[in-house]
Image (cartoon, grey):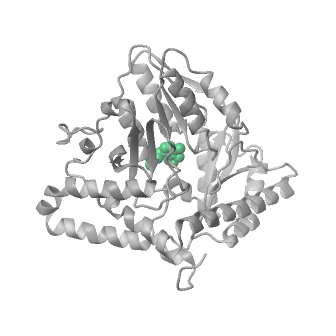
Amino acid sequence: MLTPDGRLAITDWTLSADKTHLNHGSYGAVPLLAQEMQQRLKAKMDANPCTWFMGQAVTLATTRAEIASFLRVEQDDLALVPNASAGVSTVYNSLPFGDGAEIVTTDHSYGAVLEGARRVAREHNGQVRVAVVPLEADAALTLELVMAQVNERTALIVIDQISSATARSFPIVEIARAAKALGVPLLVDGAHAPGALAEPVPDFEGFWVGNLHKFACAPRGTAAVVARGPLRAHLHPLIDSWGFPHSFPESFDHVGTQDITSWMSAKASFETIETRYGWDACRNYAGALAGYGQSIVQDAFTAMTGIDATVDVGMPVAHLRMIRLPQGLATTHEDSHAVRAFVSDALDFETAITTFGGNGYLRLSAHLYNTPGDYEAFAERAVPALVRLAQSH
Ligand SMILES: Cc1ncc(COP(=O)(O)O)c(C=O)c1O
């Protein structure tokens, strides 16, 4: 992908040249124009902190409108939080759980989100019910397995829109419909959805959280909670504030002495991509490139090991792709960290290495700044090294 003036798109970012960056999915990457806007805002804040902070709640309401417009949701349905974890904790800490409350989730759930659910369940003498969903499960089977865990004690269902370790989608609209029929609230973890999907917030009544600092490239620390329906009246910010007389979402616009320049600069990231490339073109490019990368890397593993590295993902995602690692690699969470560090330190590729069901996976991301050569280099240099590492295990 080229910039409008014909340079490689990576020149719009400030990623280091000593590594090949194939893991946008974990922490995103901020375009230079948005970094510069944030620096200008910080300078303004430091030039007169009094003026800045006295006007912050008004600024924040404007910023909320900009982010709501990007996510294509009503401004009054959205509040800003620092990250998806905070959004999930906001919902966990706000809902009125009764004694014995149960939370239903799946074995694809993000670790911090699952831990939060366990905490809430413990505090209410309840439990977390984890639906075991095979990686290859389609929408119908996934819906059936999730709803099979729901009973009269279920106080909340928590489902990934796009999972972290397994990079697959979940049938949100169908689960929302089934949950509503039973009167059970739904929380959707949409951490990976903003920017990656043209309509990132599914049309359902309940709670949705998403990170703007992943595919959407906003400065880190920018996330949203979308809340629709009567239960949103319970939502209160994680940190008590002067917003207390207001209801959702105005109650979230008073955040004390907090630097909100990342939220205010998110618009610069959205506009950089829209005006220089177009969001649809960005999504199409990332999806096609991730598909190419996946096919050459998995073919390289298969050719070297004789074992098929293809992963059957039930509801696959365009910009995040899964490849099976050679047997014995990253079979535990701890080992996945060690393999990731080896790939970064010794081979100079930034990747996500994940573990699911005792198997290790390589999760490849693609964004505008990636090129086919990035994945070709991985297939050529990193695949043989990982196969040798597996053989030495
Ligand atoms: C599915 C999912 N949920 C939640 C999170 C937490 O995001 P954050 O660390 O920004 O709170 C992540 C992070 O990668 C994620 O992948």
Answer whether residue 212 is visible to the viewer in this image.
no
Residue at image position (71%, 38%) is 138
In this rendering, the answer to whether 84 lies above or below 272 is above
In the rendered view, tell whether residue 240 sits above or below residue 379. above
Residue 269 x/y as whole percent: 43, 66
Height in image: 380 above or below 212?
below
Which is nearer the eye, 195 or 166?
Answer: 195
Q: Nearer the viewer, residue 61 or 340?
A: 61
User: Residue 261: image x %, image y %?
Assistant: 30, 61
**Residue plotted at (57% across, 65% down):** 280
Measuring from the top left, give residue 106's x and y in whole percent.
59, 31
Q: Is residue 296 left or right of residue 91?
A: right
Q: Going by the picture, which residue comes out furthest to the left? A: 50
Q: Position of residue 214 (x, y in %)?
A: 49, 56
Q: Is residue 157 left or right of residue 365?
A: left
Q: Residue at x 66, y 69 (%)?
A: 374
> Image point 16% across, 57% down: which residue?
53
Residue 210 to residue 300: above or below: above
Q: How many marks?
A: 0
